[in-house]
Image (spheres, coloured by chain):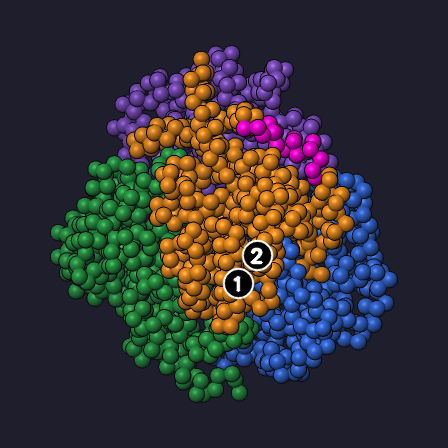
Chain colours: A blue, B purple, C green, D orange
Amino acid sequence: MTVNGAGAAERDAEKIWRALDGFRIEVPSWGFANTGTRFGKFVQGGAATTIEEKFSDAGQVNALTGASPTVALHVLWDLPGGVKDVATIRELEKKYGVRSGSINPNLFQDQEYKFGSIANPSAEIRGRALAHLLDSVEIGRALGSKDVSLWIADGSNYPGTQSVRRRIEWMVEVLGATHAALGADQRMLVEYKPFEPAFYHTDIADWGMALELARRAGPKAKVLVDTGHHYQGTNIEQVVAWLLHLGALGGFHFNDRKYADDDLTLGSIDPYQVFRIFHEIVSAREDERAEVAFMIDQSHNLKGKMEAMVQTVVTAQELYAKAALIDQVRLAELQDACRLVEAEECFRGAFWQDVRPIVREWRVARGLPVDPLKALAEGGYVERVTQERSSRNARSVSSYA
Amino acid sequence: MTVNGAGAAERDAEKIWRALDGFRIEVPSWGFANTGTRFGKFVQGGAATTIEEKFSDAGQVNALTGASPTVALHVLWDLPGGVKDVATIRELEKKYGVRSGSINPNLFQDQEYKFGSIANPSAEIRGRALAHLLDSVEIGRALGSKDVSLWIADGSNYPGTQSVRRRIEWMVEVLGATHAALGADQRMLVEYKPFEPAFYHTDIADWGMALELARRAGPKAKVLVDTGHHYQGTNIEQVVAWLLHLGALGGFHFNDRKYADDDLTLGSIDPYQVFRIFHEIVSAREDERAEVAFMIDQSHNLKGKMEAMVQTVVTAQELYAKAALIDQVRLAELQDACRLVEAEECFRGAFWQDVRPIVREWRVARGLPVDPLKALAEGGYVERVTQERSSRNARSVSSYA
Amino acid sequence: MTVNGAGAAERDAEKIWRALDGFRIEVPSWGFANTGTRFGKFVQGGAATTIEEKFSDAGQVNALTGASPTVALHVLWDLPGGVKDVATIRELEKKYGVRSGSINPNLFQDQEYKFGSIANPSAEIRGRALAHLLDSVEIGRALGSKDVSLWIADGSNYPGTQSVRRRIEWMVEVLGATHAALGADQRMLVEYKPFEPAFYHTDIADWGMALELARRAGPKAKVLVDTGHHYQGTNIEQVVAWLLHLGALGGFHFNDRKYADDDLTLGSIDPYQVFRIFHEIVSAREDERAEVAFMIDQSHNLKGKMEAMVQTVVTAQELYAKAALIDQVRLAELQDACRLVEAEECFRGAFWQDVRPIVREWRVARGLPVDPLKALAEGGYVERVTQERSSRNARSVSSYA
Amino acid sequence: MTVNGAGAAERDAEKIWRALDGFRIEVPSWGFANTGTRFGKFVQGGAATTIEEKFSDAGQVNALTGASPTVALHVLWDLPGGVKDVATIRELEKKYGVRSGSINPNLFQDQEYKFGSIANPSAEIRGRALAHLLDSVEIGRALGSKDVSLWIADGSNYPGTQSVRRRIEWMVEVLGATHAALGADQRMLVEYKPFEPAFYHTDIADWGMALELARRAGPKAKVLVDTGHHYQGTNIEQVVAWLLHLGALGGFHFNDRKYADDDLTLGSIDPYQVFRIFHEIVSAREDERAEVAFMIDQSHNLKGKMEAMVQTVVTAQELYAKAALIDQVRLAELQDACRLVEAEECFRGAFWQDVRPIVREWRVARGLPVDPLKALAEGGYVERVTQERSSRNARSVSSYA
């Protein structure tokens, strides 16, 4: 007899099906476009350039996985006309069967933001940054989108060149004004990152700073955790536990990394860490969990864009399913009795279970392809869009040339 | 003619003298005792074993530098009898001319704390930890000492073996009860540390967690920054700026490190970072600065204990003097105009100035030895105490044997 | 139908059985003794103190797992009498059914090594270090042990205090003389470590330095990889691949870590990394693999000593079994065709397989307990030795007190 | 009397003048062009676009500092026509008074190098990479340039997607063929880097790998140390000491960093580390020192290009001058006597000396501007080229849009 008898196997399947039925992860529009490093871009013929192509790709991912019904939008790249573009987006939502997800302002690309946006010493430039934030809030409201997701890239490159402290006050002001514009059903998510593109100091460097700014802004502001935005060695699941404890966790940007903000596919480097993060979510209260948005934020420089995205959703489902298998009651008993080895085996026993067969059964039952990656490969979608799009895809541009 | 004409030189000297007159840094009693790594201790014949020897050494450091009038006490090692030992300490204060500084409870050494102290799943053990904290508060009050300084070593070594989240609530409870016992002039400082002695999670891992716990405890709780307790790459001066901004910086444990919590002498690895930290202090408001206690927390495994301590105080004075030289008005102008190279040169020009001649002049004017390290070497103190103490100093004990 | 049909399942079982039949991992005598951090030791009543107790414990681990027939010895702690103790060891080998494994000299604990052993500026102290190394070689020869395993803890704590460069030459001299004494069947393994117990520079800091010293010493010197002895982010499997390529990989000290040299149980933090390391071994040539010794080097501060050791051997077997499942031929094809996602899925598909049922079957077939941890818990061994030994186990000694 | 009496001051000046007379540091052509991060480029109107503009800028830096008579060239960007462009370069050398320095092939930007260049599984692509390397060698010979400087960006982003080990052999082959083509006075420098643009493994990740490949290639191959290409915490000066010891140090790419390969201006983050690296050079034998090329490799995203380059050369001169002040004889005595604190004070006493007045005197004596940054600001060069060039300077292009 094996460890999991028939009854146990059924209970496991039940847990996993329930978990998968409730699991949603948002895909980013920019994850379908060509991206690269400062040293250059490796262009993919099938990469999406237009917003319609991005909706098409997102729709395809959702059709294959059933788990990604929304797509995150990037204001500057996807709605260059601002709120005027909303009608177009509405059409695309209908056409491709995916809705708009979080709205992402861009405060890092324009030349005027060279020395910062909302933390820029110039009141005029801070004003322009605020105007862009308010536009983003308006777009979000018009689209019925819940979250405006703020990644502030501000910072400085050399000690002494900016006042870390004065810049705090400038951020407080702009974020407060942004919060004031939020509609009743809107939230703003404040992301943190220790470095890049700024290399000496980033104005919102860690969860502590993001939390302070969110609180000062108001009750609809929460913290966004990007799994690649931490120092080496940071215990990310502990940060997640704290944010849940404080009622301040708004959501995640998922990806993986080995060194810096490498934006690799989720679970490709350290799947056990993803499992541990999911455990904190799974073991939180229902109402806490409801407030946590799952989003993918990756840069697929080498992998095929569509392949990488489908693979990511599948991996996320599998790791979430594993976390759902943990026997929370028994684990809590063992933890509180300090029976360390037993607690650990109870915990990671779930990680060792091969959940793929059950996940496949769930897919079949839900009318989804049993193997989304294979279905993608065999469906001809990538070949078709590559043919359509490849002439438009420009050659690589290095930041050096 | 040099860059600094006669007028400038005078102004520099004035700034430095004023800075040094106001500069105090506390020495730790355990910095005079034999310490080591888990692999063993290299014993020094002159190391202090008794509390009287520690007071004697601290008094000598203060006599040589004029900058360390207080000595941090460690309850378990220095007041094994608890509040009953206060009278003895009072005598030693008078005899050696240094006062008691911060009171440091010990919640990591007893066998009962194997799985934690204030975050232990056992209510009974948490109760013992609280009792020790209350004793420490009482000792502090009896000694007229301002700060009870809490380093909580709690944590876990393996994922899944403890509930990160439940432990938060236990800590909140104990720290709240400790705060309630503080006298009108007492503070409690909450220290954070990412790892060691726990290796998977430390319950108070970063400044954000320390700040939350301090706030929940009450207004007399502040955050203590140990410069060695950060992930690689953390911008410590930014954390300092934030804590000052939030009115939550209680003080420092100074030391230096290259890798982990190496507890090396201040400025021995990265003196420019110390200068940047001092700059945040120097440029803070007078009332903010008054709340920030400077303390040394180092482990002199190889250097002579007395030499290392005197060297540390002297280095701290010199780096603080450099920070005091920064032209704050001009720097702010250049920063706000984003004239980066000029701002940087204004900032680090102060670091490049050789302040040692001015510091020597200040020492002479204040009746102190012109060269404290030389005075120590020539004064015969180390030779004398080595003779007196060496028979008592045991051989090394490795944590492995 | 599942992904692995009946034929595939049989082939998987065959691969795993073959892998497990060839899998041996050495346990360290010091892993059964009380250990701690510089802040103190949490004493276990059942911890081994004498060499007989350590052999007894090692024998028990091997009886339960069938995979650890040798025990690494530490000269200073296990053979304080040097080669004179060999006869005793021989008796213990017979009595407890485990043989002596690698011989580990100790060049870090004696007071004379305060400033280094084989890299000490004093020729006299280097001479003593050499003498200890030669004793270790002699012990190894007398015991018929293959490897003398050198961890050199030498280094310095502060820039400028030692000449990094002159110390290289001193090491070359001593290691050459040690190599000259090796018997025909003996090897010396040179370990590297970036920091701790030295905090500014460690004389053998990385694999490049260890390799240079091994080569200079002679052909019987190889490099030893301790998985906890790397900078954050180091790609350890790549170092393994290079050492295999160069014919210079002598073996491993296995453990896990999150931050520094945490000496946690193997796979407890990042099991996917262990799988990747095993993949490099499994995919190496037979003759290369034969030269690679697997050893455990952990410090079980909180977990029960016996539990932790059995758990480690079991985890190592399971992760090795997973690596053995990789379809090497198919993987190479996909890699060379740069079909990234398919290659990755081929690779980590093996990691996701739950090998525990097959490993259990193998255990039964080999006459071993089906669940070694359960067998340990139920066998009463720990209870018995705890009763016998607990009176001898001293209280914790912190490096601070 | 002060520490430095009149005689000491004279001796110091003599040491510094001699050091500065022998100090040369090469500037990179790409350091004058617009660069950025993957998130975008902040364009400078005065940035150089053509090779003539780059020579003009380099000539100006050398005119101001007298220390940068050569400019590193990047084959793809500066000699797009290959060896046919040599005649043009020769003209520019004469016109602007600076010579061609190291030749830098580009094996990372072309689409064909998506999965690697010299380590690509495709023999055809490796052949193209080799052809480019041979072109670079020919260009170097035609220009009379000593060094071909190889940064190989090859690697992979995800475990399992490439064979780390097979790729080693492919590199060995190509580098051997490149070495075979070197002229009698040519060298090839092999650079290493742990990550970026590849994020899981970089084929030449550390100095050990670079050294193996250089040795296999032949005696004219040496290792190039880029100070930004190390894991956090790496003791770079120790790597330098080892490479000097092994006769394998070919040169440096200087820059500074706080986190990853940030390419900040030299000494802006950790000037004491630069001083320690220079100390290893200064204390090496004359003939060893002669083989070490100093080159700048920085990315001035925010600072003015010309300002940043002049500032870097000046900082390098000052830190080198400080290192030259160390009393090597006394230091060696103190180190070998293990008088730690005295050795450290002897060492860093040189760092604390303000060498700027002596450096200024040297400049005047050598007919150079006393303050190069001020001379740059007052000379009108930047204003002039900004007017000439700004219309040609394109807007920012993010790797995301």
Q: Chain of mark 1?
A: D
Q: Is D107 left, or right, of C399 in this rendering?
A: right
Q: Residue at x 62, y 27 (%)?
A: B326
Structural distance between the alpha carbons of marks 2 and 1? 9 Å
Q: Are marks 2 and 1 in contact (CB under 8 Å)?
A: yes
Q: Is D319 left, or right, of A20 in this rendering?
A: left
What's the magenta region?
D366-382
Residue B328 in the image: x percent, y percent? 67, 28
Disc 1, SS: helix
Local crowd size for mark 1, using a 10 Å CA cut-off: few (<14), some (14–19), many (≥20): some
Q: Chain of mark 2?
A: D
Q: Amino acid at mark 1?
A: His
- The answer, for residue D230, to whether it is visible in the render is no
Q: Residue tagged by mark 2?
A: D75
- The answer, for residue D126, to whether it is visible in the render is yes
Quadrant of the image for the N terminus of chain A?
bottom left
Please identify the quarter of the rendering in which residue A159 is found: top right
Residue C112, label in figure = none
- In the foreground, B253 or B234: B234
Q: Residue at x 59, y 61 (%)?
A: D109
Residue A374 in the image: x percent, y percent? 59, 81
Rendered position, D333 above or below C296: above
Residue B199 in the image: x percent, y percent? 45, 51
Q: Amino acid at mark 2?
A: Val
In the image, is residue D167 part of the stretch drawn in magenta?
A: no
Q: Is C127 left, or right, of A372 in this rendering?
A: left
Quadrant of the image for the C terminus of chain A?
bottom right
Q: Residue tagged by mark 1?
A: D132
- The lab-note entry on whether marks 2 and 1 share a chain reads yes
Q: Residue at x 77, y 40 (%)?
A: A122
